[in-house]
Image (cartoon, rainbow, N blue to C red):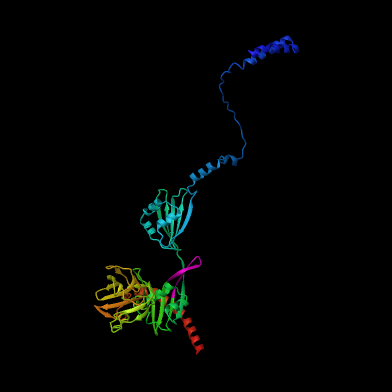
Amino acid sequence: MQNQRKNPRLLGALGKHFPRTHALAAGAASFALALTFFVSPPEVEAKRTSLEVSLSLPESALSAPAAQPEATAAAADSEADPAVGRRVIQEKVRNGDTLSDLFQRAGINSSEMYQLLSSGKEAKQLAKLTPGEELTFEVDGDGNLQSLELHRDRLSKVEFSRDSSDQYKYALHQRQPDTYTAYRQAEIESSLFVAGSKAGLSNNLIMEMADIFGSDIDFALDIRKGDSFSVIFGEEFLDGEKIGNGPIQAVTFTNQGKTFSAVRYTDANGDTNYYTPEGKSMRKAFIRTPVDFARISSHFNPRRLHPVFKTRRPHNGTDYAAPTGTPVYSAGDGRVIKAGYSKPNGNYVFIQHGERYITRYLHLSKRLVKRGQRVKQRQVIGKVGATGYATGPHLHYEFLVDGHHRNPATIVRKLPKAKAVPSSEMDRFRAQTQPVMAQLERFEQPALAQHEDQTESVN
């Protein structure tokens, strides 16, 4: 209503500047405009019109995917490539570690470990780990185990990998080292161990040489200054780096002027042993000493003065003085008939060999076999100790034949050796061993000539 009262003034003002007819037209227009504020506009239906637009773009732009936000692009990559987000974790086995400890350190759920262990018999070997071995875990972005590698050493690797059906596949990877023939020789001044070490032999090779001649030479009693040895063996290399030694191929040992020779031979059944160049076995039914490089502290003596009781009591064995914990071997194949502890004997093990022979091992710090157990020659059956009536760490070793004590240091020499190479296999034996013995002789000639020259120059 207020707007209507103002209209006459507006018409009057317009009348001053415009002709009457024009003023009336303008007034009508103003009235129509005023009505728009009071009357709602009618509803309008929206219509879509399609237009064809031609764009000229490079072919590379037409073939490229549309740009995506960063998070969306990353999700797309993860879905397309399952390897995205995988992590590799390496763990070394420590003393006392179990497989569960290693999974825990790697941050992998124990359910993954149980699934792996139940995947097949090959996985059971993961339960037996040795300090120093390495495990490599590969897990996906969700922490699920995808593969596990067990590196036993530089030559062998065990692998378990998860396939598309969520099962683990087993694979064994082995590398073959390059092997070269090596030669060492030495003359003994004090002990085999010292001479071997100076010649560049590893402890394992020295022990192997002592084992080969263990039925013929007592390395605690028979070694003399001036004894000598010559040996050829394999040296193993991987990627140009020495990683270890192969077994002894041939060896000679001169003890108190008598020379013993041995050569390695693998028979038609695949069994490997050492023989003389004539095909006789180096292995007797019993080894001479059940402790390596020990010192005899008391010999077999039926009238010995007992060190503890100071009375004449027979000493029915041989005492080998050695540090506590030194391995004690079974002198031959047999069955454990007694294993226990008594006040005079301490920890002890008795072994029956066939029907006639028994060996006894006393004063052990540990027993490693049980009654009724079968044992092999040179199997570790216990550790040197000082239990029972003992004045210090040593092994008391007895040898009985038909129930009677015999001197362990001499009885073994009278016992027969193992079987020789059968006559039907001698041609095969010679073809395999003669080239090796000839090679050892070629190595020995220059060394012998040099030794003779040095002797002449001293004289």
Q: Is residue 130 above or below residue 29?
A: below
The foreground one among 127 and 270 is: 127
On the image, the x and y values in percent for residue 278 come to 36, 78
Please tell me whether residue 245 belongs to the stretch shown in magenta.
Answer: yes
- On the picture, is 269 further left or further right than 8? left
Q: Is residue 108 left or right of residue 55?
A: left
Which of the 4 quarters of the picture holds residue 355?
bottom left
**Residue 197 or residue 178, whichever sits in front:** 197
Per the picture, the main secondary structure of the magenta-coloured stretch is: strand
Q: Is residue 83 above or below residue 54?
A: below
Q: Is residue 431 visible?
A: no
Q: Nearer the viewer, residue 266 or 320?
A: 320
x and y, in percent, of residue 300 in the image: 31, 82
- Magenta region includes residue 41: no
- In the rendered image, the quadrant that contains the N terminus is top right
Residue 194 in view of the camera = yes
Q: Which residues are magenta?
A: 232-246
Q: Residue at x 29, y 71 (%)?
A: 341
**Percent position (x, y) of residue 353?**
27, 73
Query: Image height check: is 133 above or below 256?
Result: above
Q: Residue 38's image quarter?
A: top right
Q: Tell how many labels.
A: 0
Choose between 155 and 86: the one closer to the eye: 86
x%, y% of residue 11? 70, 11
Determine the residue located farthest toward the right in the rendered image: 17
Q: Residue furthest front?
A: 309
Spot the residue most to the bottom: 459
